[in-house]
Structure formats: structure tokens, C-alpha cells
Image: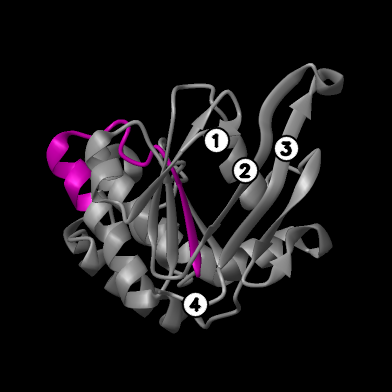
Amino acid sequence: MNNAAPLLAVEGLSRHHDGGAVKALDGVTFEARAGEVVALTGPSGCGKSTLLSLIGLLDQPTCGRVCVAGQNLAMVRQPGNFRLHQIGFVFQFHHMVATMTLLENVEAPLIALGLPRAARRERASNMLKQMNLSARADFLPANVSGGERQRAAVARALINRPSLILADEPTGNLDRHNNTIVLNLLMAHARSQGALVLIATHNPEIAGAADRRIELCDGRLVA
């Protein structure tokens, strides 16, 4: 039995809209630990993206709480700084800056950490090498394939070595080959860095490969 304290603790988490008429999330409770890959499943509109937004400090809950690495997120006064050090995001659409090369996009989060330019470039180059993207480092996002852009987005999410990765349908626009590559990269990060990877997905391959699955329906945890 793993008795380690959970990296993520979600307790009675709800997010209501329109004065409570719309319950995007309703009383969700679960825990997850470092080193786990957890699939978050359920039909469209069930609350997966809402849950990730609340965990990632992109939204605030109506009630309940989220703790990451023992920190109650309601007490975080500088969300941007907390995300920078603790959380990496991977979205279905890569959100790469169109006017920056893949190397510059991957390097960008390191600027806020105050790393010298040479150190930033070295780390970003090494990350692109892990993604088999060294040959595309100086390309703009528009000049590489969709799979390459998404792999670069994963590299950008992992560059700060966060303890928590939130991935929202990260393979939704990818073919089977690139789907497998992205999944393997996320799983490797969880194993090698002792990080928690939480993946919202409709993909049965990802759900099957994860250590465990959390299922939502109509904003509630059902399995």
C-alpha cells in the first residue's frame, strides 16, 4: 500500500453558474499521488475541463477545495507564480506562439524563472531532442506538422519540471502514431520525475494505459 501523502487532494469541489442553476461540477472528491498517470473520462460536458481549470488555478470553485503538494489553492496569492513552479498544461490545441520558433516557444516559460539565456537554450534544446524535434527547432509552428506542434507543446509543459501536469484532450487532433508518442512522453515524465499526470480524454487507449481512471457524469464523480 502507498502511504505517501497525496500530491493532489480534491474535496467536495463544485463549480456552479447562473446562481446555481448550472452545475458544471458538483461535489467531486478524490486524491492522486506523485508518479501516477490518471485518466479523467466521461462524456462531453461532464465537467472534465472545468475540473482541470479549477486545479490549474484558471478558475475558482463555488465551494470545496483543492490542495496541491499540501498547499490549499484558496490561499495562493500569486497564481501565476504557483503555476510556473508547480503545474504544466497541455491542451488539445497547442497554443504555440505563431511568430516564435519551436525552440523559442519551449524556452519561453524559463524566462520567468530568471535562467540565463544559455541555460534556457540548453534545457529547451535537450527537451526538443527528447521529443525527436531537434531538426525542427528553428521552424515556426505553421511550418511543422500537427503532431510535431503537439509534441513541442508537451515539451513546453514539461520544461519547468512541474510536479503536476494537466492535459486536456492532448491527443484529440492526432493520428494514432502521434497519439502513442505523446502518451508515452507524458507517462515517462510521471515515472522519471515523480510527477502526477492528470489527462482528460475520450481516448480509450489513454484510459487503458493510465494507472487508474476517474469518471465524471453531469459534473459528478461516478467511478
Question: Percent position (x, y) of residue 50?
Answer: 61, 35
Q: Nearer the viewer, mark 1 or mark 3?
A: 3
Instruction: Say left or right for 91 vs 75.
Output: left
The answer to whether marks 1 and 2 mark residues whose Cβ atoms lie closer than 8 Å is yes
Tell which circle, 1 or 4, labels the residue nearer the N-terminal end. 4
Q: Amino acid at mark 3?
A: Ser
Q: Nearer the viewer, residue 25 or 197?
A: 25
Residue at the spot of label 1: 49
Question: What residue is disc 4 on?
Answer: 3
Going from the N terminus, do you reach mark 1 or mark 3 first?
3
**In front of the other: 29 or 181:** 29
Q: Viewer-nearest of labels 2 and 4? A: 4
- Disc 1 from disc 4: Cα separation: 29 Å
Residue 21: x percent and y percent?
Answer: 79, 16
Mark 2 vs mark 4, CA separation in Å: 28 Å
Query: Which one is nearer the viewer's eye here, 171 or 26?
Result: 26
Extreme-right residue of the structure: 19
Q: Which residues are magenta?
A: 163-181
Q: Position of residue 121 (x, y in %)?
A: 39, 75
User: Dividing the picture into quarters, in which one does residue 115 lie?
Assistant: bottom right
Q: Which mark is residue 53?
A: 2
Contact between labelled residues 4 and 2, with CB atoms less than 8 Å apart? no
